[in-house]
Image (spheres, rainbow, N blue to C red):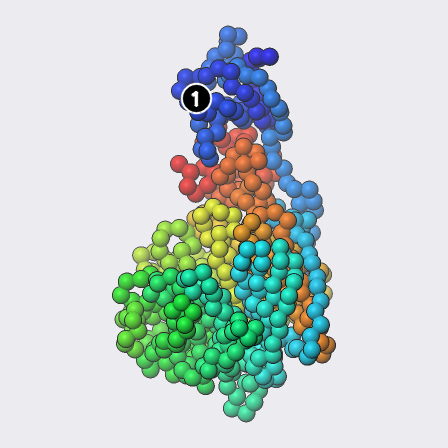
């Protein structure tokens, strides 16, 4: 029957429209939602407020309607999330106590974990073992993944160890609908950072730049190994005929011609010396294009990343670059951004930019004991192992992310240094832009993707090892193996270039020391983390697949805010940029930012995401 409807706070009422207030368009008549006493109609993803009307009773009413259903409006935490948060904070405190007075976390107030992180129950795990015809060394390496229909292919490459030359491995694993299927394995001299290059015609070229740090143990040893290419007709990796000593490499589209190329960093002894080169891809035909760095070309770097905004020049981000102080006037232990003609026709730099102080060169970390004390004055305390230029804050220019670490047995560290571009000058805003970030592990591999389809770039982080297990093995720490020492993690963007870790220890929980997990994002939004682990001195390789049970969206704990009638709501943005909401949660009035918005923020006109008016 028709009834005058007055909706109390905290209740949804879904109604069929039976009368039309002034200004309410007919195309919206199918249904409306009433939230916190205010009536709204949904038009696509926007919300149109209905004018308040006075019913014949004289009370402020909004509509004559037939109630179809009622449901509790206030979104609460997922089941078990409060317990997860308490366990996480207790584990984090144990590391704080060990590292004290040194810091180990950035913006790790419990609210960020409690409202943004996946609950532990949102992860599921599959383990599969494969017999191999030879023993394969576990090695040090990283991976990449790509999707073809229902198949996800994971590429993973390693070098063995500092005293085992020529014992690396290359793996190619297919997962069908997320489950491990066929595994191809092959012993190689050594490699890392495999790449699946889009050829621009629907096909891919698979490459592994060579590096074998096991050879460094040999007299006058050089860390060189062949650059490997996947030959589909032979179903195996074959040598390209080019030797590299590439600790790091990164793919990008040089010249913007639609196919992906690789910037390959080099060390002394490789075919192109210590100068980097671009592996130019022309629809699957791969050709090296040397990058001559002038006098500096005879000196080493840890990573070289392109800073490519088109135009007449291309920049190179050089990390742990030794010799820049004498050649270019860049201070020792500093990273640099060096610009060259885009066609690389000259070895003379067009511009040299000294980047901000590497994160761990701060006085705070000056007394941390290093594994290699001789790095002081050249590489420095801050071991800067990966870099990429990417627009973090959505302002259409390139910012810089540098993965930094401290290689220490007693106090190891890792962080993503965020250098924000302001009209060509870079400012270190790491401390104000990373949230729920535990600085216990560095990363040799970053992937920048949009995991929640909000148009902002997010970050997938991968590395081998577990800091807690390492400290325990050296007798410094009693580790609970609850995953905080692990390296793999997922950071979500609030839309303005602030990042919160929403998956980390859940991936490593109960595992301890581990090979790297290769992250991937499936077309249906499911995140997967795949570890390929050869067993030491045994012809067996184990595959561990950790998957999320639901895609991460923008609501509380990655749930879809449209389920509560507020599509586009961003929990991270809302809590970060609306202090009154954050304080209400900290006081225990609400469990989530979305609950605050429904009850109070909507009426107050608080912004729900970075793009809201």
**Would you name the residue on which mark 1 appears?**
26
In percent of width and height, residue 59 lies at 52, 12
Tell me: 563 left or right of 513.
left
In percent of width and height, residue 281 lies at 40, 69
In percent of width and height, residue 101 lies at 59, 62
Q: Quadrant of residue 507?
A: bottom right
Residue at the image point whose x is 57% and y is 35% from the top = 563
Residue at the image point whose x is 64% and y is 66% from the top = 182
In percent of width and height, residue 465 lies at 62, 68
Residue 221 at least partly seen: yes
Q: Is residue 590 above or below residue 442?
A: above
Q: From the image, which quarter does the N terminus lie in?
A: top right
Residue at the image point whose x is 57% and y is 34% from the top = 564
Q: Is residue 343 above or below residue 559?
A: below
Look at the numbered disc 1 and give the secondary structure of its residue.
Answer: helix
List the single residue furthest toward the front: 233
Q: Residues within 10 Å of mark 1 (few under 14, many from 20)?
A: few
Residue at the image point whose x is 55% and y is 16% from the top = 65
Residue 469 at least partly seen: no
């Amino acid at each position: 029957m028709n009834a005058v409807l007055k909706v109390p706070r905290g209740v949804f009422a879904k109604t069929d429209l039976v009368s039309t207030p002034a200004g309410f368009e007919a195309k919206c008549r199918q249904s409306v939602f009433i939230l916190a006493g205010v009536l709204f109609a949904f038009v696509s993803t926007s919300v149109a407020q209905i004018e308040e009307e006075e019913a014949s009773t004289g009370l402020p009413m909004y509509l004559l309607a037939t109630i179809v259903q009622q449901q509790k409006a206030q979104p609460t935490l997922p089941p078990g999330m409060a317990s997860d948060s308490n366990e996480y904070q207790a584990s984090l405190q144990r590391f704080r106590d060990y590292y004290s007075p040194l810091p180990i976390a950035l913006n790790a107030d419990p609210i960020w974990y409690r409202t943004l992180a996946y609950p532990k129950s949102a992860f599921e795990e599959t383990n599969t073992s494969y017999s191999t015809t030879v023993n394969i060394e576990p090695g040090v390496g990283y991976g990449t993944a790509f999707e073809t229909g229902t198949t996800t292919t994971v590429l993973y490459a390693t070098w063995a160890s500092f005293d085992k030359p020529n014992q690396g491995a290359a793996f190619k694993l297919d997962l069908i609908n997320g489950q491990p299927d066929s595994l191809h394995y092959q012993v190689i001299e050594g490699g890392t950072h495999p790449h699946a290059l889009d050829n621009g015609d629907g096909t891919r070229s698979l490459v592994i730049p060579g590096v074998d740090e096991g050879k460094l143990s040999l007299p006058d040893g050089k860390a060189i190994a062949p650059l490997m290419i996947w030959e589909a007709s032979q179903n195996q990796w074959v040598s390209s005929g080019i030797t590299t000593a590439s600790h790091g490499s990164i793919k990008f589209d040089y010249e913007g011609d639609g196919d992906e190329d690789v910037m390959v960093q080099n060390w002394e002894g490789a075919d192109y010396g210590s100068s980097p080169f671009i592996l130019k891809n022309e629809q699957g035909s791969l050709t090296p294009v040397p990058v001559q760095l002038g006098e500096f070309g005879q000196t080493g770097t840890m990573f070289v990343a392109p800073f490519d905004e088109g135009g007449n020049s291309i920049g190179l981000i050089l990390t742990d670059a030794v010799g820049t102080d004498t050649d270019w006037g860049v201070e020792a232990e500093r990273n640099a951004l060096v610009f060259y003609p885009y066609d690389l026709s000259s070895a003379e730099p067009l511009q040299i930019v000294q980047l901000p102080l590497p994160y761990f060169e701060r006085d705070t970390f000056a007394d941390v004991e290093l594994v290699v004390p001789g790095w002081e004055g050249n590489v420095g305390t801050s071991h800067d192992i990966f870099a990429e230029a990417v627009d973090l804050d959505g302002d259409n220019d390139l910012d810089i992310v540098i993965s930094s670490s401290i290689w220490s047995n007693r106090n190891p560290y890792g962080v993503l240094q965020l250098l924000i571009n302001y009209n060509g000058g870079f400012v270190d805003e790491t401390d104000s832009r990373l949230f729920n970030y535990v600085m216990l592990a560095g990363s040799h591999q970053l992937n920048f993707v949009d995991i929640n389809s909000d148009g902002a770039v997010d970050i997938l982080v991968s590395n081998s090892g577990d800091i807690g297990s390492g400290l325990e093995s050296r007798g410094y720490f009693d580790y609970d193996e609850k995953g905080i020492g692990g390296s793999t993690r997922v950071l979500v963007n609030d839309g303005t270039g602030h990042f919160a870790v929403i998956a980390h220890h859940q991936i490593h929980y109960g595992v301890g020391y581990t090979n790297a997990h290769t992250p991937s994002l499936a077309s249906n939004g499911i995140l997967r983390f795949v570890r390929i682990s050869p067993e030491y001195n045994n012809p067996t390789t184990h595959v561990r697949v950790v998957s999320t049970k639901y895609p991460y969206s923008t609501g509380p704990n990655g749930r879809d805010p449209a389920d509560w009638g507020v599509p586009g709501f961003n929990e991270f943005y809302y809590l970060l940029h609306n202090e009154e909401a954050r304080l209400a949660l900290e006081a225990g009035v609400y469990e989530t930012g979305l609950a605050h918005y429904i009850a109070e923020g909507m009426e107050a006109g608080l912004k729900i995401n970075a793009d809201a008016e």
